[in-house]
Amino acid sequence: MKKKMKVAAFAALLSLSTGLLSVGTASAQDAGAADADLISRGEYVSRLGDCVACHTALHGAKYGGGLKIGTPIGAIYSTNITPDKDTGIGNYTLEEFTRALREGVRRDGSTMYPAMPYPSFARMSDADIKALYAYFMNGVAPVHSANKASTIPWPMSMRWPLRIWRAMYAPSANPMNVPEGSDGVARGEYLVTGPGHCGACHTPRGLGMQEKALDGKGGEAFLAGGAPIDNWVAPSLRSDPIQGLGKWSEDDLVTFLKSGRTDHAAVFGGMADVVGWSTQYWTDADLRATAKYLKSLPEVPVTATASKDPRPTTEMLASGKTQGNAGADVYLKECAICHAVDGTGVNRMFPPMDANPVIVSDNATSLVNVIVNGGVLPPTNLAPSSVAMPAYGHSAHKLSDQEIADVTNFIRTAWSNQAHGNVSAAEVQKLRTEGSALGSAAWQVSMTGFAHQAPQPYGAGWTFSPETHAGVDEAQ
């Protein structure tokens, strides 16, 4: 009898132990699944912030840093944000990571250059930052690559003045906890003003290199168009029908961010990196929310101008009678085969020349740059074809600086276009040989390291200018 009781007790104990083991295994599996979900979520957040484009050097290791970012006073280089403990962020705690994103303060207490868009990241939600941290610590391969020193001369290279900049211009952390899945305006505001940091390029900067507005409450300056970045002008995202998004629908914006092309526009320059590495991976709900927010912004005042009949330009080019018009002659010989004599281009392949906001921008740098250096319309998941334009400033089809100036000025005033100002051959030559944006001026630095202005550089070149990956290396 006692023997039977012992056997029964042992069986019960074994059953209980097995049950506890089963519960423990299930809990571990649940925790593992939760961690995997968090890492996956963090990877998506990294797409929202396009972290890879700035933190990957041309032809470099993913997130290994080293991308050159030009400033008016020298170059800085993006940092290694892989989990490498010696050269990356592997020793950061979640709290230190959060402070770096929202406040621009490194683990050692020094302030980051505001090329890091921490004024925008101050709005990122706790959940998104936690997920992003999990991804960088557990989903990114460590890269042992030391960070590069800036070329900014002393004493301007000292970091302590950046604390003053941060106090003056960087907002306090103000997380916008808008849940994912909504395609409403509130979600769009979070994406545009937070992780997407659209204003870092599309909002003009003030004398202190600060964005003049961080959201719609900042008035007309918000997303009004930025300075040339790597010789590509970030256009206005406001309601201006000529130089902005006034004629774009929500569907146009969704399609553009997902594929990089619409029937009346094609992505170029730094925005090609944004589409290729970031927005094409966003959910449809997030793309729709972004479009709704941009179209919900208050209208900006526009100077009324009389419309211009495009037919005389089309008829002149179609007839081949371009004698006496040097720019029209170059266009007919080199451009019309793709962009057509009526300037309409080919839908979703060759962008139109007529009524294109980039063409009539007050700053012609983008147009001159694409003629001189060529451009690539990158492939995306929705539009897998890649379309390239030759570099007429360097290739076998090389045009002279004067011819490039002539065709630029012709396009900007042809058809219905009514752009202001002419481009000179000297400006083309400077962009081609020195990489200088039109209308910009660099700081002159003396041997002692102190800078003087000759002339005042505040204006066209007054921004942070990261190198562009599109057309140079493969998309990550």
Image (spheres, rainbow, N blue to C red):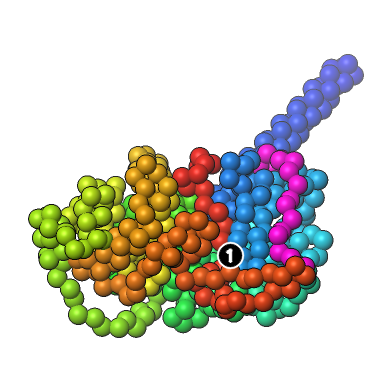
SS label for mark 1? loop
Residue 193 sits inside the magenta stretch: no
Question: Which residue is at the front of the view, 283 or 324?
Answer: 324
Q: Depth check: 181 or 405 in front?
A: 405
Read off the residue under disc 1. Answer: 464
Image coordinates of residue 297 in percent, x first then y, are 40, 75
Left or right, 406 with reference to 189 = left
Amino acid type indicated by mark 1: Phe
Query: To which quarter of the image does residue 170 belong?
Result: bottom right
Q: Relative to the observer, which residue lies in front, 47 or 58?
A: 58
Range covered by the magenta-colored residues: 137-154
189 horizontally vs 137: left or right: left
Q: Residue at x 66, y 49 (%)?
A: 65
Give the answer, above or below, for where 375 lies relative to 244. Answer: above
Q: Residue at x 37, y 68 (%)?
A: 423
How far across and how far down the image is residue 22, in percent? 71, 31
Viewer-side residue, 180 vs 214: 214
x%, y% of residue 392? 37, 49
Indicate whether 119 appears above or below 92.
below
Q: Residue at x 19, y 63 (%)?
A: 324
Going 64% across and 46% down the picture, which residue do you hit? 63
Q: Is residue 432 above or below residue 409?
A: above
Q: Is residue 175 visible?
A: no
* Residue 225 at least partly seen: yes
Pinpoint residue 388: horizontal percent, then vertical percent.
Answer: 37, 44
